[in-house]
Amino acid sequence: MVMRLRRLAAAYAAAVLAAWGTCVCTSPGWAASGNPVDMRVTVAIDPVQAPAAVSDLDARAGPSPGTAGLSWTSPGAFGASYDLAGGRFFIRFATNPFTNFTPPADIVIATDAAPGSAQIYNVADLEPATTYYFGLKSANALNNVSSMDARSATGFQARAFIEGIARVTDLAAAPGPTVGSVRLAWTEPRHAGTTDPRTYDIRASTTGQILDTADFSAAKPISEFSSTAMPLPGPGGGAAVLVIHGLDPGRVHYFAIREQDSGSPQAVGAWSRDTALGWNVNNFAAASTGLGPVPVSDLGAVPGTSEGDIRVSWTAPSNASGVPLAAYELRYATFSAAGLGLGADAWFSAAPLRLSIATTTAFGSAESLVVVGLDPGTTFYFGLKSRDRDGNSSLVDALSSDIQARCMPRNLPPASPGGLNAAAGLNRAGVSWTALTAAQKGLDFAYYRVQRSTEAGQDFVSVATVAAGPFVDRFLKPHTTYYYRLSARDRAGLESAVTSAVAVTPFNLPPMAPLGVRAAFNADGSSVTFTWSPTRRWEDGTIFDSTAAPTENELQGYSILRSTEICVPNFHFLSSAAVETSSFTAYPGGELYYYKILAYNSEGPSTSTVVLSSLGERNFFLPDCASRLIVGDQEAAALSKATNGHGADIEIERRQISEDIGGPVFQSVEFKAMKEGASEVKDFHFDKPVRVVLRYNAVNGVPVPSASPLSSSSARPASGSAKNLGVYWHNGVEFKKLYGKVDPAAQTLTVDTPNIGLFQVRSLYRADGAVFDLSNLSSRVITPNDDGLNDVVIFTYDPGPNNAQPAGRIYDLQGRFVADMTSGLVPNTLTWDGKMNGRAAASGVYVYEIKGDGKTFNGTIVVAR
């Protein structure tokens, strides 16, 4: 009963010890009368106490070959007390002495052993004829582990010499000296406790490797291949050689060997081919053909010294005929013979890469070759044949049939890039560098790695990997300094040193003013609704990085401003519109208002805006608040992508050409049609005339060249002092006179024209009446063949102060009437289309006559067909 209580107490203590250092264990018992009574035992336990170290571990040769028998006395769960309920024994063994180990070990045994009880255990699968050393620890249910057994700690470690026959681990096969022979060589296995006589069991296969005991049993005895007599085993440790004859010449044979005794039970050595341990890796060979050199048996491949290099080495093979070697044929591929699955010869024929190497070396000489320019990230497989001077070739090297020579080329990191530069952009940074040359990149260059930080010298993170520069880093915070550095990386992950960092501070611009603005009036004129295309560019024409959902640095919304004056510094705020909004309805209430629709972002509002009237008129002002292009609501259809045929909204860009001003030029202004505000639309014109107003400066009534930049002047010339000013327009080839209406009080000239482009105010003699200037004749020769080129002659005149409206007629050289001229699209012009009564006039010379304001102008033109 006491022993039982001890066991129960120990088990219970193991379960509750983590919570209490003392437990009271209750167990039912029985009095002599047979009545049950409670029996209580109080157990005081140290919660960190481990079992005592075993003091009598013993090891001996086991009951069968390859085993060892261990015995010891169990300690208690806590020191020498209490059962090891829920405990474990840990056993470690090795072929060298040791003084400690950390569980878990080679063997773990669960146990409930009582203190002082005898324990035994047989360790199996040990290598025969080998001394093994053993150590033991125990642990209780709380995983408190004892020290290693006392014998090991004092230097008298338990050990045992294992009986049985050791395995052969170095069997090597090579073509033999005669046709159909293979030479086998191995070290005789050691043995202990065996019964003589001992014999060898040699097996062979021509269909595949013999890897383990199961393959050994399936392989055929060597007697089925050859009548060669088997040698008897020696005492162990000596070199053994056997030449097997009568094999199929040229065929690869795989061999396995083990030794066995004549005892009962029989001791048998194990067979194992393990490339990781280096056991029996050369256990195969092709039987000698007797023609040409024997196959190379030690072909190897290692990385070379330069990137993309592999150094291939081998030993020059022998030749049974004695004929010297003449050449080697090296072949290599990115697939193996095993992967091809058709044998070494088929692989050798299929390998696409090959080198021929002449040689005069003697048998046994060390040979090597460096293969260059290979992809460092790829494994290459090699095979080799040799050829003698008589032209006889060997078989493919023996390793190609099994552990084929293989290697990945030497890999080196790319060079560090140079010339790193970072340029500030719109909420972005343009990172550029000098591209690495092919040699600097190496053979397996992958990409450049761009790193960024907002702290100089620290906290860099990768933001991009690119195959080539430059790189644009977008969506940056404007007015914040960023630091960039760069490295180059190859496909294997090797990376260059990073460059020094460069700093850059992105900037921002206001957005472009809304384009495609249209005005729609209700029936009674009480309201006008303005619509526009969503703004998707900055004011310099750069498109947003995020057009679908602009960021706050790109676009935050729209502001609608209003004023009763057409050009004042500050329009009054009327309303705002969200980014997603593209319309606004105004209610003029019978007043004439002018409106501006601005786009704005974190940098501020757009600057180059159009002034819209409540009647739909657009005014594209220059900064002097007088020079402008005025486009009516109907003519504005040419600016909207919905109606202009360009598929894009048109912005009118305007600027003063200050370098042109001086001498006879008093003002020079250019209007350009810009597609989406970014690219110029060449030869743009409106379908109907629009109005160009140009302001000039005057001092005491005398016109003077306008200041630059454009600005208003308080000087007001006297009426009539500027009558000799006129407007010139450049048609792409030369300047043409448009004359224009002079307003001395406002210091402006006004012309109506469908064309835009470069306009200048120049000094020009203007008579008191209408003037027709031959220099303004569009062409003296016309070709009216309806090809759109030079089909019409255009006569431009100055209507003079009386605003004369001349009339013109065409006659032939005999004075016969041909046709009346018609008013041109451009005001103050007359045209003739080269036709008479609706039919093409004949080629020849014709006379024009223009009359107006009491004057007559004559001249000739030529019709050519």
Image: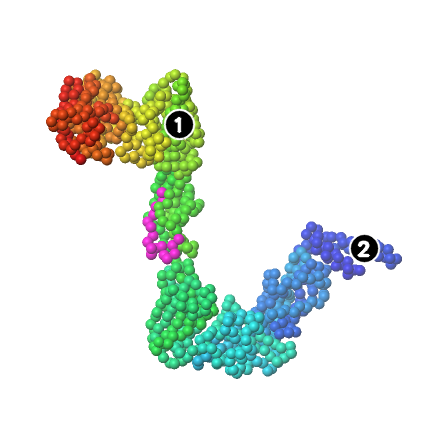
| Span colored in magenta | 430-446
Q: What's the image's color scheme?
A: rainbow
Tell which of 459 and 562 is nearer to you.
562
Vertical relation: 542 (above or below) 42: above
Q: Which residue is mark 1?
A: 531
- Whether residue 436 is in magenta: the answer is yes
Quadrant containing the C terminus in the rendered view? top left
Q: In this orientation, does residue 257 appear? A: no
Residue ID at (34%, 28%):
637
Image vertical order of residue 583 relative to residue 427, above or below: above
Q: Which residue is pictured at 41% across the width and 39% down the height?
A: 475
| 226 versus 600 height, above or below | below
Q: CA distance from mark 2 to mark 1?
A: 97 Å
Label 1 sits on a secondary structure element that is: strand
In terms of image quadrants, where is residue 864?
A: top left
* Camera-side residue of 610 and 407: 610
**Amino acid type of the residue tagged 2 in the rendering:** Pro
Out of 560 and 781, give the one closest to the viewer: 781
Residue assigned mark 2: 28
- Horizontal side of 757 relative to 250 (left or right) equals left
Report x, y in % for residue 86: 69, 58
The type of residue carrying mark 1 is: Thr
